[in-house]
Amino acid sequence: MIMKNKFDLITSPLEGTNLIEASAGTGKTYTISGIFLRLLLEKHLEVDQILVVTFTEAATAELKDRILKLLRDAYSAFSNGRFKEEFLKQLVANRPDQKDALFRLENAIRSFDQASIFTIHGFCLRILQEHPFESGNMFDAELSMNQDEFYQEIADDFWREYLYDNSPFFNAFLLQQNIGPDSLRSSLQRYLSIPDIVLIPETTIPDCSDLEDRFRK
């Protein structure tokens, strides 16, 4: 059952799966920063135990800056009672053990360079590098935003596997028609944007050697 409630940063649940719907300019970054802060203080998590994932490098940098600033503002609020936001005022009021809060905030600020704040691609790369055995990847896996080389590799592999040892006469005909690994790559890229594309089942190609001999003659 899905429950829809008006979002409240100070009382929103920190358990289970929660979807927050928000339009542009409604303070999503500040909300994420506030949830991050609450997880530190209420769930006693360390900065490297909280995963924050966004889309772009710019958004990642902004999140890091905003979260760190809120942590520092929270430290100031707990240490001297000075706060600019109502959220911090309520947060301080809800936590009578200020020494514990200051201790956790100080540790979080000092170790903030270990915070797990990534782009989607950056997070995937970290998982591949830290768990090469589980993912079946090489230890030196790298992140590449240009997929052209992968498409070319697929086309080259197909050509070597199915056509390299084929009839020279047939291969010469393909090349005469400008059909080669490069054209195969172009065809591949043209169809990758179709998620529900239907692949033709594998079929047995008949032996055409006699036909080729007659055609050659």
Image (cartoon, rainbow, N blue to C red):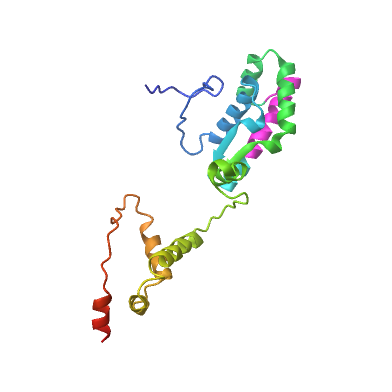
Q: Residue at x 52, y 21 (%)?
A: 13
Residue 33 vs residue 196: left or right?
right
Q: Is residue 154 above or below residue 45?
A: below
- Taking the view exactly as shown, the residue that stands out farthest to the bottom is 217
Residues rendered magenta in the picture = 63-83
Counting labels gives 0
Residue 96 vs residue 10: left or right?
right
Asked if the magenta segment contains residue 67, the reply would be: yes
Q: x and y percent of residue 206 in the render?
A: 25, 67
Q: Residue at x 51, y 38 (%)?
A: 25
Whether residue 82 is visible to the viewer of this picture, yes or no, is no
Depth check, front residue: 113 or 34: 113
Asked if the magenta segment contains residue 46, the reply would be: no
Whether residue 209 is visible to the viewer of this picture, yes or no, is yes
Q: Is residue 162 above or below residue 27?
A: below
Q: x and y percent of residue 112 in the render?
A: 70, 35
Q: x and y percent of residue 80 in the render?
A: 76, 21
Q: Residue at x 68, y 34 (%)?
A: 69
Q: Residue at x 40, y 71 (%)?
A: 165
